[in-house]
Image (cartoon, rainbow, N blue to C red):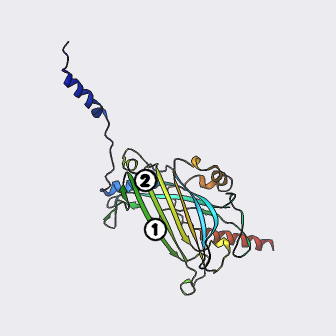
């Protein structure tokens, strides 16, 4: 039997793993469609209807001029979402997300979900109304081409990680205010700041339908919460926290899963993909809560 020369045999053995190794297809984020897909992988999944969960926790401080900041609450929050694919002859590939979210205010010492809270500024004990916003949907579809402009990822890649920050200034008519806010004030004024860190290799892998290794940081600067009954007292709140994208609802801490399953079972799943309801905020939810409470009190009279 004829044998190969030793040098050829060594070269063959060295090259065989490289030949056999499958080349991973990557998203090219210089292409608008791939950039949109990468964006979708960060916050959700490329599979229509597949639910994704974001969980985060942190602290809430008060800030009043001339006083030390006070730690008022800790919190845990979650958002459960899903996305749907869209195609447009002019705009190309796109997607839209639908979601629900809750956030529970907790005692800083016991870490228990609060039912009532003694306001240290007024001395009054008030009922705690947690965040339970259904829905919190994208108002429009994110397309590869929008108003003639190609979509671009807003963040940057550095040392194997994709980093993205976004600020959301909020300034709108307060649902609890009257019809003359432009003259008398009372407009809701806040800012939310989101920071994402994503594994670059996972994000750009075109064969993966979602990015699992996503960490988040969240900051919110806002007026007093309506259920605190602070009226027009000077001051505001600072929320600070961090969390991550989870593989499923089951991965959340037991205390928040128990609270949701006991009192907010709707939030175990995302809304339907064709949901077109107007979005809820802490203010619209609180208004409905107050209106219902007042109606019940009126019925008892």
Name which quarter of the figure residue 40 lies in. bottom left
Image x and y of residue 202, in percent: 40, 47
Query: Gap between marks 1 and 2, in whole Å?
Result: 18 Å
Q: Residues within 10 Å of mark 2 (few under 14, many from 20)?
A: many
Image disc number at residue 167: 1
Instruction: Work out which quarter of the rendered image holds the N terminus and state it.
Output: top left
Q: Residue furthest top?
A: 1
First in residue order: circle 1 vs circle 2: 1
Q: In this view, does 180 lie above or below 224?
A: below
* Place of residue 123 in the rendered image (x, y in percent of width and height, measured from the top left): 74, 74
Image location (x, y in percent) of residue 274: 50, 57
Counting from the top left corner in percent of width and height, residue 161 is at: 39, 53
Residue 66 appears anywhere in the view: yes
**Left or right of residue 120: residue 183:** left
185 vs 21, left or right, is: right
Of residue 115 and residue 2, the one placed in the foreground of this image is: 2
At horizontal 36% and vertical 55% (from top left) the residue drawn is 158
Q: Quarter-wise, where is residue 69 in the image? A: bottom right
Labelled disc at residue 198 = 2
As rendered, which of 132 and 202 lies closer to the eye? Answer: 202
Label 1 packing within 10 angstroms: few (<14), some (14-19), many (20+): few
């Amino acid at each position: 039997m004829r044998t190969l020369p030793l040098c050829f045999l060594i070269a063959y053995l060295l090259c065989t793993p490289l030949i056999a190794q499958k080349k991973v297809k990557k998203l090219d984020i210089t292409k608008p469609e791939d950039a949109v897909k990468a964006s979708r992988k960060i916050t959700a999944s490329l599979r229509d209807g597949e639910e994704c969960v974001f969980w985060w926790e942190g602290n809430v401080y008060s800030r009043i001029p001339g006083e030390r900041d006070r730690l008022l609450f800790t919190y845990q929050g979650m958002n459960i979402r899903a996305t749907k694919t869209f195609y447009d002859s002019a705009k190309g590939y796109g997607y839209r997300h639908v979601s629900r979210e809750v956030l529970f205010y907790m005692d800083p010492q016991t870490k228990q979900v609060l039912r009532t809270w003694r306001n240290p500024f007024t001395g009054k004990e008030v009922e705690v109304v947690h965040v339970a916003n259904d829905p919190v949907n994208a108002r429009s579809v994110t397309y590869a081409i929008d108003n003639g402009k190609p979509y671009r990822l807003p963040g940057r890649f550095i040392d194997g990680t994709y980093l993205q920050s976004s600020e959301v200034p909020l300034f709108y008519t307060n649902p609890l205010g009257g019809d003359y806010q432009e003259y008398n004030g009372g407009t809701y004024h806040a800012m939310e700041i989101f920071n994402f860190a994503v594994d670059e290799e996972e994000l750009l892998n075109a064969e993966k339908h979602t990015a699992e290794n996503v960490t988040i940081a969240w900051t919110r600067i806002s007026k007093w919460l309506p259920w605190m009954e602070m009226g027009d007292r000077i001051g505001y709140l600072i929320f600070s926290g961090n969390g991550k994208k989870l593989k499923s609802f089951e991965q959340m801490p037991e205390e928040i899963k128990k609270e949701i399953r006991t009192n907010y079972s709707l939030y175990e799943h995302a809304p339907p993909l064709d949901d077109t309801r107007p979005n809820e905020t802490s203010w619209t939810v609180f208004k409905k809560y107050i209106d219902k409470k007042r109606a019940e009190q009126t019925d008892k009279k």
